[in-house]
């Protein structure tokens, strides 16, 4: 069962995509929900990184997320704000990211909502940019010469939202293997 | 019909609280408390109601001062039908425009033609017809009108339940009845069919107008809203930072009564409330 962090943002859209792939999904708001054995992966959705980051700490979710990330079979996928929270370095974030993915991410790097855009594989909404990719990090997808989907072992991060355009392929690639 | 990128931004606001702020200091408090966006305006609705006069778009310098401190989306209000205020806000690069009944309407005949803008719009509605007319005009997000500045949630609840009932009624209608309903609501029948098939509005739908406490916010979520706007409820309470934080938590944990009880404790005085029947001005009747 894939857990979707449901503190704020577009969590329902991820659950819909997982359901389309016939993968079981559940909402995660508490430490207890996250530590359940049936939960074998985690999605950190898009939304506001300041809000999610704040409540990851207030609801004591940081240490269990980091603990589960140590298991190479436990895949974590962050989209947009989710990527920001997974990154090692985020210069303009108030608060500490989870630092599970060795990249530097710049928030709202394309500009304001006027600069948001939609492609056939996903939607870039006030999107961040990946400005540095660490040595152990693989660039899985690029768009206009910028990395937009990266992975470091079991940790995946994307700057765009496949779930907002009904694209199931990214989730299939990450979670529907083995 | 939709501003798709705007509709997507609204999806990112779901499960969150959008707070009215009147200066940079309040914006910082709101963001720190966990707001997912702020609404920049000159006076909160309860002050507009008390002071009277014509309420207009905020001054650009005030909006800019809030943009300078906020890292979350910044919204601002225009008067109903005031296309030029909307163009000014677009030029200021705000993230969302609220064409709002809280300000004094500018056009007695029409709303802003929102389709001609790149910036997304949110609009208020008291029922399904109003919501669908605003969506047809290009709104990317809908909120209930409620009755702003009263601290009284009854009108927001009325609008949520009315819309839900009207969507439910669509499900049992024949094609002919649907065509009639579309005609009555003055919208395209295809939009009405889309709502029937989805069982909800095709855009994000927030509660607004009269939400004053964490319990009010949780009630709106329980009734099926995607998130909550809080206006006067935060900065007219005795401890804004605490109330703001509590309302955000209540929206996350709205299903957990035990947590709501903890969240609701020790918040000080809520904003003073007003009984609807005593009001001189019902903002919800503006711009139908």
Image (cartoon, coloured by chain):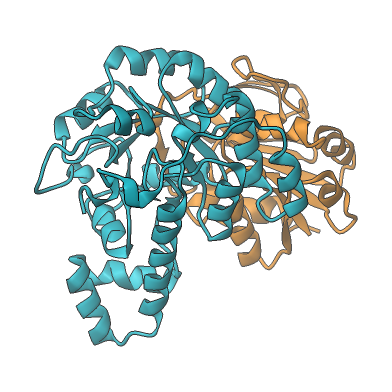
The x, y position of residue B121, in whole percent, is 31, 41
Residue B250 seen anywhere in this rendered image of the structure = yes
Chain drawn cyan, letter? B
Task: Find residue A63 and report its image quarter.
Answer: top right
The residue drawn where x is 66% and y is 56% is A172
Q: Which residue is drawn at 62% across and 19% down?
A: A93
Q: In this view, does B196 lie above or below A50?
A: below
Q: Is residue A149 left or right of residue B203?
A: right
Q: Nearer the viewer, residue B243 or B253?
A: B243
Residue B111, percent across and down?
17, 46
Shade representing chain A? orange
Quadrant the C terminus of chain B occupies? bottom left
Which residue does the image show at 60% across and 25% down from the upper left? Answer: B239
Question: Up-down: is B127 above or below A90?
Answer: below
> In terms of depth relative to the viewer, which is nearer, A72 or A86?
A86
* Residue B45 in the figure: left or right of residue B282: right
Residue B61 position (above or below residue A70): above
| Residue B146 visible, this angle | no
Q: Quadrant of the N terminus of chain B?
A: bottom left
């Amino acid at each position: 069962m894939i857990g979707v962090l449901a503190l704020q943002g577009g969590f329902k859209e991820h659950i819909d995509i997982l359901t389309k792939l016939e993968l079981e999904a559940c909402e995660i708001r508490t430490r207890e929900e996250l530590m359940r054995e049936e939960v074998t992966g985690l999605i950190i959705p898009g939304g506001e990184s300041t809000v999610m980051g704040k409540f990851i700490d207030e609801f004591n979710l940081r240490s269990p997320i980091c603990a589960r990330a140590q298991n190479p079979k436990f895949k974590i996928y962050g989209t947009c704000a989710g990527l920001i929270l997974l990154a090692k370095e985020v210069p303009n974030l108030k608060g500490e990211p989870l630092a599970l993915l060795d990249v530097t991410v710049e928030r709202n790097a394309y500009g304001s909502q006027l600069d948001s855009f939609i492609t056939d594989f996903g939607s870039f909404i006030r999107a961040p940019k990946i400005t540095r990719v660490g040595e152990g990090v693989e660039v899985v997808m690029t768009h206009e010469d910028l990395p937009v989907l990266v992975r470091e072992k079991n940790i995946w991060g994307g700057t765009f939202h496949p779930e907002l355009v009904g694209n199931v392929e990214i989730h299939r690639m990450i979670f529907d293997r083995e | 019909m939709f501003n798709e990128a705007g509709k997507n931004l609204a999806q990112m606001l779901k499960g969150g609280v959008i707070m009215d702020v009147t200066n940079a200091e309040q914006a910082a408090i709101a963001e720190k408390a966990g707001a997912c966006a702020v609404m920049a305006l000159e006076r909160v609705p309860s002050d507009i109601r008390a002071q009277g006069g014509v309420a207009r778009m905020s001054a650009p310098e005030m909006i800019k001062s809030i943009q300078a401190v906020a890292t979350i989306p910044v919204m601002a209000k225009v008067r109903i039908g005031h296309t030029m205020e909307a163009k000014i806000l677009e030029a200021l690069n705000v993230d969302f425009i609220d064409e709002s009944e809280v300000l004094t309407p500018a056009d007695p005949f029409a709303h802003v033609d929102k389709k001609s803008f790149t910036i997304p719009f949110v609009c208020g509605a008291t029922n399904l017809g109003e919501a669908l007319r605003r969506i047809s005009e290009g709104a990317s997000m809908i909120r209930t009108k409620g009755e702003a500045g009263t601290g009284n949630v009854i009108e927001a609840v009325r609008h949520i339940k009315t819309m839900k009932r009207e969507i439910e009624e669509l499900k049992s209608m024949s094609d002919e009845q649907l065509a009639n309903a579309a005609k009555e609501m003055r919208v395209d029948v295809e939009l009405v069919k889309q709502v029937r098939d989805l069982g909800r509005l095709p855009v994000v739908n927030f509660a607004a107008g009269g939400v004053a406490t964490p319990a009010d916010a949780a009630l709106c979520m329980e009734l099926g809203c995607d998130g909550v706007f809080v206006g006067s409820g935060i900065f007219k309470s005795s401890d804004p930072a605490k109330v703001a934080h509590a309302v955000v938590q209540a929206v996350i944990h709205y299903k957990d009564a035990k947590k709501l009880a903890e969240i609701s404790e020790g918040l000080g005085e809520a904003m003073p409330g007003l009984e609807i029947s005593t009001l001189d001005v019902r903002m919800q009747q503006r711009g139908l």
